[in-house]
Image (spheres, coloured by chain):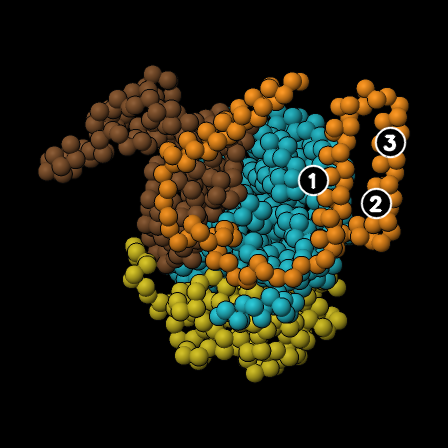
Chain colours: A yellow, B brown, C orange, D cyan
Amino acid sequence: MRMENNSLRQRMETLVPDATFPINSQYLELVVPDGLFHEFCLNLKTSPDLLFDYLISLTAIDWKDHYMMVYHLTSTTFRHTVVLKVRIDNRENPQVETVSDIWKTAEFHEREVFDLFGIRFLHHPDLRRLFLDDDYGFPLRKDFADESRMIVK
Amino acid sequence: MEYEDFKDNETLELLKKSGGNILLSTIDNIINWGRSNSIWPLTFATSCCGIEMMAAGAPRHDFARFGVEVYRASPRQADVIVVAGTIVHKMAPVLKRLYEQMPDPKYVIAMGACAISGGPFYYNSYSVVRGADQVIPVDVYIPGCPPRPEALLYGIMQLQRKIKSEHPMGNGKDQIDPDADAETQAKNK
Amino acid sequence: MSSESLVLFFIIGIVLVGGAVVFSGFIAPSSINPAKSEPYECGIPVQSPAWIQFNVGYYLFAIIYLVFDVETVFVFPWAVVMHGIGMRAFVEILIFFVILGLGLLYAWRKNALRWV
Amino acid sequence: MQEEIVKNIILGEDEDYIINMGPQHPSTHGVLRFEVSLQGERIKKVVPHCGYIHRGIEKMCERDTYAQIIHLPDRMDYLSAHINNEAVCLCVEKALEVDVPERVTYIRTILDELNRIASHQLWWCAMGMDMGALTTFFYGLRDREKILDIFEESFGSRLIHSFNTPGGFMHDIHPGFQKRIKEFITYFRQKLPEYDRLLTNNVIFRERSIDIGTLSKDDAIQYGVTGPSGRGSGFSCDVRKIEPYGVYSRVEFNEILMTEGDVMARYKVRIAEMYESMRILEQLVDNIPAGDYSAKMKAVLRLPAGEFFQRVETARGELAVFIVSDGNKSPYRIKFRSPNFSNLFIISKLAEGFKIADLVAISGSLDLVIPDIDR
C-alpha cells in the first residue's frame, strides 16, 4: 500500500536511526551516513512494505567543500518516492559504495558520475570513463578549468 | 529563388573574375556538368541537423531533383560530406578519417551553426570543436539551427555553382585569388 | 545471328567499357593519403584482423549455390536450340533437372542448408 | 610481429572477431559506436561506446540564466524538443510557485501530443528503413511534414521551436492552429491503418521482429528502461499517469502495455500510442480556454535555494529535470535524467546470441537518440 511521506519517514527512522531529514516540498529526503549505506539500500529494495525497485536517477553535486550523492528511488508497486543522499567529505579521493548490484541501471549512471566528477565507486564491475578520454580532467567539478578548449562567457 | 538571379549574382561574377579566362574548355564543361549534377552525400548526421537533412531527402523537399540522388553509407561512394551537427573533440579524428577516405573530387558542406562555428555550444563548452573547418576544408556553409531543408537545397545549389566554375583539366589559369595582394596575382597570371 | 555481328557486338562492348574506365582514370584527380588505403570501418581504425576461421557452413552454402548457378548456364544454350530439336530435348533437360534435384535433396538431408 | 600473426591464424578461435558498428553508421541513429564481437554472423558481445556527441550541456547550464537554459534541452532529444522544453519550464514554475494560465497548460499538452506523434512517425520511418523497407521512410516523413507545418505556422520553426518560457509562451498561437490540427487528425486517421497494413503484417518484418531481443519486465525495471521500450514488456512507467502534469489528469486516455517484450511488442506499443495521442488531441483541441498566453514573470528569474525535481514523459521515456538552486540567476547544478541513457545499455543484454542484422532491429525498436545519451 502506498505510504505517505510521514509514514515513510517513521519507517526510515526505524531503519537507520541517525539519518537527517532535510525539508523538501515534494518528496521525503534523507541523508544517510555512508557507513551502512549499502546495506540500507538493499533493505530499501527487498523489504516487503517498501520495494524501491526503480532507481530514477543517480547524480552528484559538488558543494565545494564536500560532494553529495543524490539517489531518486521509487517503487513501481507502491508508487512512493524517496530521495536518498550520501555525503562524501574526502575531496582528494572521493569514494562511495556502489549500488550497481542492487539496481543494474546504477552501473552506467555511476560510470557517468565517475566520468564527470571523479568519484570512485567501490566494487563497481567496470569503472571506466563513459564520454571523455582518460587523461582529461573532471569537468563538472566546481574547480574545473580548461582554457585551451573552453571559452568562458 | 528565380532562375535568373540564380544564374548571375555578384558571387558568380566574383568566381568568373577570379577564374582568369572563364572560357572553360568544352572538356571542363562536360566534366563540371557531370560532377555538379550528381553529388552523392555521405550519411553523416551527428545531431539535430541530421533530421533536417533527412527531411530534405524526404518527399516534400526532395533534393533528388538536384542530382543529390541517394545517401551513401560509406565514404567510398560519396562525393560530398554534409557535416550536419556538432563536432566534438572525440569525433574530430573520425571526421578527418572519413574525409580522407572519400575518393576525389570531394566536397564538404558545413550544415548548421554547430558545424560552422560551434553554434549554441560556442561558449562554456569544454568538448565542442568550434566549427568543422578546424578539422576539414569546408566548401559551403549553411547557417541555421537547424537550417530549413530549403536552406540545405540552396546550399547544394551554391555547391553546384562552385563546381561549375572549376578547372578539372587545369588548362584555365590557376585560381587568381581576387583579394590576394597584387604581387601573387602577377605571379599567377 | 551471323558471327560478324557477334564479333562487332563484342568489340563495341570492350570499347565502351574501356573508354569509360580510361576517361575517368584520365580526368579524376587523385589524392594519396595514409587513411585512404586503410579499410573503412565507420571511421574507427580496424581492430581485429580479418584473417580468422569462419564456420564451414558458409562454404557449403557457397558451393551449393555454385552448382545450381552452373546449371542455369547449361539451360540457356538449351533454351535457344530447344525449338529445333523438339520433344527429345525436353526429356533430356528433365533428366538433367532430376539429377540435380537429387543432389539438392541430399544436401538438404545432410543439413547443409541449415543457416548457422 | 610476423610470427604473431601466423600464430593467430592457426589458433583463431579464442580471439574474438571485433567489428565496430561505429559512429558513422546509418542504423545507429547518430554517433554511437557498438563494439560487436562476432562469431560468424552470431553476436557474442555488444559493448556500446558513447561520448562522440558529448557537448557538456550540464556544465553550460551552470552559467546560463533560466531563460537561456530552455534552448539546450531541445538540442538533447530534438525529436521531443517541446516536451524537453516544457520539463525545464515546469520545474522552474514549480520552484517559483507560479500558477500558469489554464490556456497555457492546454496548449502545452496539445503540443506534447503533437510532438509525440511526430517523433513516433520519424521512429517508424527510421526503423522501417533500417530493416530494408524504404517506403516507410517516404510515407513517414511525408505525413510528419503536416505536423511540422502546424509548428511552423505558430512558432516559425519546424523541429526545435523553443516556444516555451518559464511562465507560459513567448507569444500566442496562430488562429488557424485548431483548424489545422483537426485537418491533420482526419488525415492521419486514415493513414495510420495504412502504416499498419504496410509494415506490421509484412512477413519479412514479422519474421525479423517476433521473439527477437525479448526484454523481461524486471530487467526493464532493473535497467530503468522507460517509455514505449519499457512498456513493451509490461513495465508501467507512464509519467502522465503516475505524476500527471499539465492537463493529463483531466484527459482520459489509457496506457498501452504489452507483455511479450520483443521488437514487435515495442513496435505495437508505439503504433497504439499514436492512436492514444490522437484521442487526447481530439478531446483537447476544441476547448482551449481563452486567456493570456503567459503569466507575469520578472526578466531574470532567481529560483529560491533548494532542490526541485520534475518528471516528464517524452516520446522515448521518462525525462527528469533535477535543478539544485542556491538562489542566484543560474542553477548551481542541473541534471537531466535522459530516457535514452538508460534505454541504451540494455542492448548488450538483449542482442546476445542474435545475428548482427537483429542488432539493427533491436536498436531500431529501442528508438535511441544519441545526443540525449551523451548530453
Which label lies toward us, 3 or 1? 3
Helix, strand or loop for disc 3? helix
Q: For this rendering, which residue is in front, D234 or D182?
A: D234
Q: Is residue D295 visible?
A: no
The residue that appears at 34% across and 16% down in the rendered structure is B4
Q: Is label 1 or label 2 in front?
A: 2
Separation of marks 1 and 2 at Cα, in angstroms? 43 Å
Task: Tell me which chain the residue with mark 1 is part of.
Answer: D
Q: Nearer the viewer, residue A141 or B153?
A: B153
Tell me which amino acid carries mark 2: Leu
The secondary element bearing badge 1 is classed as helix
Q: Residue D315 at x, y = what percent?
A: 60, 46
Q: Is residue C110 visible?
A: yes
Residue beneath the point at 43% across and 44% down: B102
Which residue is the extreme one toward the front? C3
Q: Which residue is mark 3?
A: C92
Disc 1 residue type (three-letter):
Ile
Relative to B6, residue D47 above or below:
below
Going by the image, does D240 lie left or right of D371? Answer: right
Picture quadrant where residue D118 is located? top right
- The numbered mark 3 sits on a residue in which chain? C
- On the image, numbered disc 2 is attached to which residue? C104
D358 left or right, relative to B127: right
The residue at which mark 1 appears reads as: D271
- The residue at the point 68 percent across, 29 percent down is D191
Q: Amino acid at mark 3?
A: Glu
